Image (cartoon, rainbow, N blue to C red):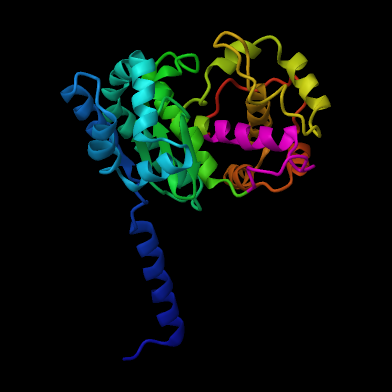
Amino acid sequence: MPKSPRSAVFLSLLAATAFAQAAPRPEPEILTEDVTRFYALYDATGGRPTVEQIEKDYLAKGTPSLGAFAKARRVTAQSIADRLAKDPAVYAKAKDCLVELPEVKRRVATALDKLAGLYPEARFPPVAVVVGRGRPVGIADNGGLTISLEALCAAEFMNPDAEDRFVHVIAHEYAHIQQTAPHEFEPGDPNATALRYALLEGGAEFVAELISGNVGNGRHAEWTRGKEAEIESAFARDIDSTDLSAWFGNYRSPDEPYDLGYWVGYRIAKAYYLGAKDRKAALKNIIEFDDPKALLAQSGWTPGMRLPAKVSGEE
């Protein structure tokens, strides 16, 4: 007996639902072969590979992520060799972080799986750990996230625990991959305000906390404790300013507070999330916002307001 059209539609919907529930979440690649290859060369040459060896045995055999990173940040065999000669301890120390990578990979995979559950629209390009010329810490774009092992390993001021530092910074940078608002502006663009950058960077910090358990820069909590109202009142006066120097990119030493705009934006995002009835929708808005003033108004944030120290995506 043939099925009625209504029964056929119902069965199709049921099958589609079952398939969607059974379909595995994407498993992003977490690539570490570049650092493994570099340190094989490093050990074989007593920590002094030549420019030719770095080019032939490391860069030429690299992953696409390493190639893109090298091109974008002027990483060459010569620049690596120069930094090795100038700061050999940086590369020797990075071997300590190398041994942390298996557990970092496991924890990052767990964090990104959590991101997939909280934000179904998430994209999962690869995460690659490479060796560069000592800076930058990494780059994130639509092609994925690339982290420089030796640069992040040296950034103990962010978090003294190397494993935690890698996990939380990678989670922060991966949040940037998901963001849809522009990150770069021409000089003088009135849209490049302190508030916009605070929500971009602070939003990424908040996503990192939700999925990995903490923010990328753990020092902000220490620097701001007891000064919340003072710092945020100052920021509130600067929200429309395009002079970002007081809030971003103002690192001077590991012991002086810097990038406090990240922390303020993180607090605004947290207030918005906690005040929302639909937290999954709230997270989507934090990631995809295009109107900083609207998100600020809806957040209920006020300078110095009390907020829980940490929020997990389970709440």
Q: Residue furthest right?
A: 237
Which range is magenta? 181-207
198 left or right of 152? right
- Closest to the observer, 261 or 147: 147
Report the side of 223 relative to 137 (left or right). Answer: right
Q: Is residue 195 within the magenta segment? A: yes
Which image quarter: residue 190?
top right
The question of residue 185 being in magenta is answered with: yes
Question: How far across and how far down the image is residue 312, in percent?
Answer: 51, 31
Specify the farthest residue to the left. 44
Q: How many marks?
A: 0
Q: Can residue 172 be seen in this view?
A: yes
Q: Looking at the image, is 143 positioned above or below residue 136?
A: below
Point out residue 137 in the picture as x, y percentages from the top left corner: 46, 29
Q: Is residue 45 above or below residue 37?
A: above
Residue pushed farthest bottom? 1
Residue at point 41%, 39% (across, down) = 70
Asked which quadrant contains residue 149, the reply is top left
Against 171, residue 225 (above or below) is: above
Q: In this view, does 240 lie above or below 88?
A: below
Query: What percent of the width, then of the height, locates residue 296?
Result: 75, 37
Q: Is residue 33 visible?
A: no
Q: Which of 226 and 79 is in front in this view?
A: 79
Q: Which of 135 and 287 is in front in this view?
A: 135
